[in-house]
Amino acid sequence: MNIKELEQEFIQNLSQLYGPDEAKSIFYLSASNILKLNYSELIIKKDKPLSDNDSASVLKILADLKTSKPVQQVLGETLFYNLTFKVNEHVLIPRPETEELTDWIIKEIRDKKHSLLDIGTGSGCIPVSIKKNLPSLDVSALDISADALQVAKANAILNAVEINFIEADILAFSDGEKYDVIVSNPPYIRKSEKGNMHENVLAHEPHLALFVDDKNPLIFYEAIAEFATKNLNPDGYLFFEINENLWSETLQVLIDKRFKNIELRKDMQGKDRMIMARTNP
């Protein structure tokens, strides 16, 4: 088979699941991973016959994708903030909106602060990216899942950064350590909102990192905000990624905890997605 024929196989088999445009994008991502060619090289060599091994490897990816498994999990890696991150079924696949939050943090605290804690770190995409861009920052990352922390540790090694990892449940965590910055992208999707989500997310990504009970959807925001009142230094920063449908309620949590200079930002889709708050100087 050649590259053009493989592309048609992907489009034919995945269009119903993803649509033809995304199916085509998934093909080029998959083929690039196996053949070690960039997009331009794949186009130039589209009529060149491939070895049986290479064709079989690309078709094996297609077989996995037909089960609705996300391409990032099939390939075992993804790009985030221009860095490569390992991913598997134990961690959320990093989203573009989380990349936007990470960019905001880096630009906001650059050269101002010395220590940061990421709560609910998952793959480690937030702290690893921040540490890579702000190498003088002392960075810690916490997660309840030992399996997730194994992935995060591997990503720290992969990207050559040192991070202090903590296995703990933030709902029961007590720590005397003080930080200049606390950031979290905690579970925030209400179980009643599952119907709005793509099947490949529901079937293959960890529900522990996604969902909260409808009766108490802000449980993690309340716990982290309370933790931050005790563990943030004066003039400290608290950053959250949030549920766009609960932005007002999340804002009120921070107001009730007497945070200052609270700022709400939209993501590139126009959804209320990120909040920054400050402690008193």
Image (cartoon, rainbow, N blue to C red):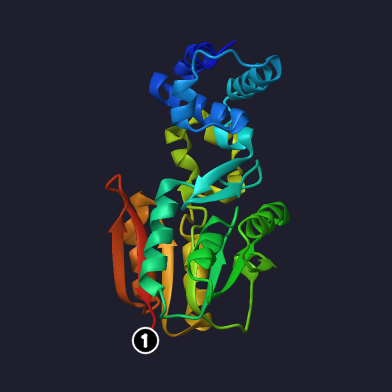
Mark 1 crowdedness (10 Å alpha carbons): few <14, some 14-19, many ≥20: few
The quarter of the image holding the C terminus is bottom left
**Residue 93 can be seen in this image:** no
Which element carries disc 1, helix, strand or loop? Answer: loop
Q: Nearer the viewer, residue 236 or 160?
A: 160
In this picture, residue 175 sits left or right of residue 47: right
Which corner quadrant of the image does residue 112 belong to?
A: bottom left
| Residue 193 in which image quadrant | top left
Q: Amino acid under label 1?
A: Asn
Out of 264 and 160, give the one closest to the viewer.
160
| Vertical side of 273 occupied by 232: above or below | below
- Residue 210 visible in the picture: yes
Q: In the image shown, does 80 or 116 lie closer to the viewer?
A: 80
Q: Which residue is mark 1?
A: 280
Residue 3 in the image: above or below residue 248? above
Number of numbered tags placed on the structure image = 1
Q: Position of residue 129 (x, y in %)?
A: 51, 60
For the N terminus, the image quarter is top right
Is 216 left, or right, of 175 in this rendering?
A: left
Horizontal side, residue 268 vs residue 52: left or right:
left
Seen in the picture, residue 27 relative to 194 is either above or below; the reply is above
User: Is 177 situated above or below 264?
Assistant: below
Q: Nearer the viewer, residue 280 or 171?
A: 280
Locate residue 181, reporting x and y percent.
47, 75
Residue 124, given in percent of the width and then of the height, sits at 59, 57
On the image, the x and y values in percent for residue 134 come to 49, 70
Residue plotted at (53% across, 36% down): 201
Left or right of 106? Residue 147 is: right
Q: From this viewpoint, which residue is outermost toward the left?
A: 270
